[in-house]
Amino acid sequence: MRTPLAIIGGQLEGIADGIFTPDAATLAALTDDLSRLRRLADDLSSLSRIEEGAFTLHRAPTDLSALAQAACERLRPQFDDRQILLTLNAGHGATAAVDAGRITQILINLLGNALPACDPGGHVTVTVRADRGPAPGIELRVTDDGIGIAGHDLARIFSRFERVEHPGRSAPAGGSGIGLTIARGIARAHGGDITAASPGLGHGSTFTVRLPESKAAHPRTKSPRTTS
């Protein structure tokens, strides 16, 4: 948190000393830095609650296909702007008792990571499927044909503050390096998990969220709040 605090402090001191003019551009820059700091504080708060076990889920039976469609539509303008095709393959019967807001948070994180991983003309696919095997569950997959992940990085990308660097490509701006850590914590709090796979650099990657299938909400949980 030191970097945005130092930037804000320097800008305010410059305004006080008459070096910077408190015009619209300067105030917009301060607002952007404050927003970045607020997001980081929120991420750290979520991570702390997850690691301390003070993480409350508001479960209810949820159609995960509909939830994935809503998440895709929410981010589709960003994919269209980057000329990246976003496709949803959603099956029927993908229902589980989950905290809809928290699962949406996972999907937004995974889609937000897939977007900068692709070049214009790339393709990202979200797949929702019900697994009727010995351990019934629902799988949410986010697959991209982007830069991929080296084998030695797969084991560490879920660790806190890890940001995989790729030669010749700058890291996404504004990332805290704990988004995947939080996403994994949310999935595990549901009794599920997240895994990552990649054929290697330049060959894309797939993130798979697996959630246990359940038709009824846990009796001690509350109904989820509506999310925008």
Image (cartoon, grey):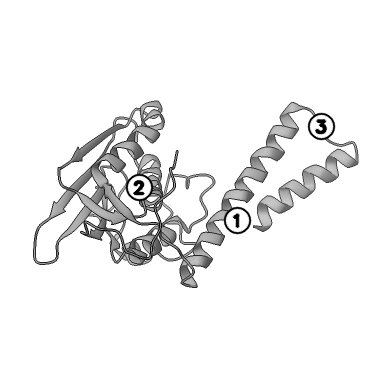
* Callout 1 secondary element: helix
Residue 33's spot in the image, x, y percent?
Answer: 66, 43
The mark found on residue 30 in the picture is: none
Which one is in front, 115 or 44? Answer: 44
* Residue at image point 9% right, 66% down: 134
Q: Residues within 10 Å of mark 2 (few under 14, many from 20)?
A: many
List the single residue furthest toward the right.
17
Q: Is residue 65 visible?
A: yes
Nearest to N terminus: mark 3 or mark 2: 3
Q: Where's residue 227, x and y in %?
A: 44, 42
Residue tagged 1? 41
Amino acid under disc 2? Leu
Q: Which mark is residue 22?
A: 3
How far from the left and from the top, in percent, is residue 22? 81, 32
Q: Which residue is mark 2?
A: 107
Task: Tell me residue 89's x, y (percent).
Answer: 19, 39
Give SS at disc 2: helix
Looking at this view, is 6 or 102 the one in front?
102
Going from the N terminus, do you reach mark 3 or mark 1 first? 3
Residue at 26% x, 46% y is 64
Kind of residue at disc 3: Pro
Give the mark nearer the N terminus: 2 vs 1. 1
Q: Residues within 10 Å of mark 3 (few under 14, many from 20)?
A: some
Which residue type does callout 1 highlight?
A: Ala
Q: Residue at x 24, y 50 (%)?
A: 141
In the image, taking residue 168 as reference, residue 41 lies left or right, namely right
Q: Residue furthest left?
A: 133
Residue at 39 percent across and 47 percent down: it is 113
Q: Quadrant of the N terminus?
A: bottom right
